[in-house]
Structures are given as C-alpha cells and as structure tokens.
Image (cartoon, rainbow, N blue to C red):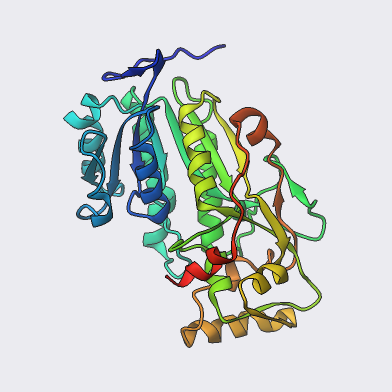
Amino acid sequence: MARTRREPAGRSRAAGAPRHNVLITGVSSTVGRHLAMHLAGDPRIGFVIGTAPGPRPRFLSTLDPKRFLYIPTDILRPRQVRDLFHGAEFAEHGIDSVVHLAFVSHPNLRGRKVHKLNVEGTKALLDRCLESGRVRKFVFKSSDAVYKLDPTTPVYLDENADLNHDPEADQWVQDRVAAEMICRSRMDAAGMDVVILRFASIVGRNVGGQMNAYFDARVVFKALGYDPLLNLVHMKDVIEAIRMAVVKDVGSGIFNISGADTSTLRSFAELNGRRCIALPERLLPVVNWAMRRLRMTDYYYSVDRDRMRYTCLLDTTRAREILGYQPSRCIEFSEFRGLEG
C-alpha cells in the first residue's frame, strides 16, 4: 500500500519542486559542521536547524541566519527534545527531515553514559520524530563497522550481509549495531521514511575516525600475514551522500556508501609516509595499549580487530541505482598529512 504523504507546515517551493527543511542533531561534530554549511547554501534546502548540547559553536556563526538556526539541545533530556519539536521555530520553518549525527565517535569514550546517548538517544529521537506528525524522513549515519567479518566473509558486502552481534565485540561496534536495529524496526512505520547510510572509513581533516587515528601514528602496526583491502571515503562524498538521502524520495532503506579509493592497508600507510610493521596478531592489542598510554596514537585496535585481518569492501549497487550516489573525490596525499591539523 502506498504511503500517504503529508505536507508539513512552512514548506516552501523553488522552481516548482518542494524544498526540504532539515534538523541536524550533533551539528557540532565535524560531519555536522560540514553538512550544515553545505545544506545552508543548497537551493534545494529551505531551512536548517542544528542542535547540540551547549552554546552555539563559533564555526557556525558565519551561516546566514535566514537559512540556519542553532538551538542548544541535549537529546537525552526529554524536556529539551519536547521543547524543540513543539517550539515555534520547528513549526515556523516546517522541519520535515532529520539527520541524526548525535553519536559518540571516539572509541576512548565508552560506558553506560555513552551507550545511553548512542542507543537510547537514537530511540528517543526516532520516536519523537514519528510522534510529531511532521517529520517525513529520518536519516541515520552508520558505519561499515556493523558488519560481521570472518574468513568466510565475501570480499564485497551488500546491505543484507550479517551484522556483528558478537557480545564480545567492542562497545563502539555494539552501540552502532543496536542503534541500527532500532532504526530498522521503525522502517515500516507509516508516514516517515527511515534511511540508514553505512559509510566506509571516513578520512578528512579533524575527523575523529578510526582510520584517521591509525594512519596518523608515525609507525603503524598490522597483523603478520594479513594485508586486507581497505576503502576510504572523502568527507565531501560523505556530505553528498547525506544530501542525496535528504532530497531524494528513495523510501525507507539501507545504503552502503564507499569512497573512490581502495587499496591495501600497507599501501595507504606508505601513501601517508608512515612506516608499516607486521607483528604477530596476539601482540597487536598489547602494542596498541602501550602506544595509547604513551600518547602515540588515538587508535583502538579492539574496534578493528577483524578489519586488521579480513577485507571489508562495500557493494554500493543500491546506492548507485536508487540513491544516485557515485564517489567522485579521490584521497590525496595531502589528505593524510592534514590529519594532524
């Protein structure tokens, strides 16, 4: 049965086509900042509201107040979330799409409080969107880290590949799988599309990702006997994929998003001018722990223990055919050198 589309209040039009009005949670993150700046200048977007706990970040002060508004909101505080959705600004600007980025990205931050934000915060926000009667699309930024990797894993994984439900997996992985399962459970809800984007490893200046931290170390260590293929996605392609998920009517679904560059782990290390040393696998957790203690790296081996052995490349057929996504930015040598800045 076809879904009945609602026209939210305050919806504007440009060139005869509906313009989308977007709420971005976690706008203070690197991805959130880039997305806000991009959408606020996109003629297909009517208005953008950005939220994060605390005062407005200075880097958002350059955005046109006629296109962007910052509202300090902690999604773990029900009253603040309720005030956001029932506030005059939300109704006035006809917010019809939500991009959820309020997710802890640093593996060094963990525990009950982090889990609450990552998983319970996602559920609370998603339920509030459904209850609002105004939001027509919910976009969740996920990661290829949710996939289960073992010796039988095919080189290319499509969206139906098994997820990592191992109870011994790092919390960084477990939280992402749990949040995804919540989003998937709401995909059949009437009146709102839920779109999950599973990104390959994101590389870019000031991106707090695992591969950024890994390649930023002056010496990198890999598992002896293994040199898995790795795909890296440029920040600009990340933003473009999210923009497409917002402006295109693709229904509910999951999309793998990869970058233009694929090579071996060692090759990427050499591209970054790093020395790559192979060690027996059993030594990698110990060496990684020592490097973190000495502040030589922010990388957490426990998150990527399977990725250090088995290739995880994404089949992006659905993203190409349905979303219209095609990576266009290659990772340059300067991208790696810029990790320290």
Give residue 203's position: percent from left, percent from top: 54, 59
Which residue is found at the position 53% from the left and 44% from the top? 180
Residue at the extreme left of the image, as rendered? 88
Which residue is found at the position 70% from the left and 36% from the top? 317
Q: Is residue 227 left or right of residue 67?
A: right
Which residue is found at the position 50% from the left and 52% from the top? 235
Displayed quadrant of residue 291: bottom right
Displayed quadrant of residue 70: top left
Displayed quadrant of residue 25: top left
Give residue 94's position: percent from left, percent from top: 28, 24
Which residue is found at the position 54% from the left and 87% from the top? 290
Q: Is residue 205 left or right of residue 309?
A: left
Residue 246 vs 336, above or below: the answer is above
Q: Is residue 83 left or right of residue 256?
A: left
Quadrant of the rendering where the N terminus is positioned: top right
Residue 282 vs 143, above or below: the answer is below
Give residue 66's position: percent from left, percent from top: 22, 33
- All told, the count of numbered labels is 0
Quadrant of the rendering where the C terminus is positioned: bottom left
Give residue 16's position: percent from left, percent from top: 40, 12
Residue 8 vs 46, above or below: the answer is above
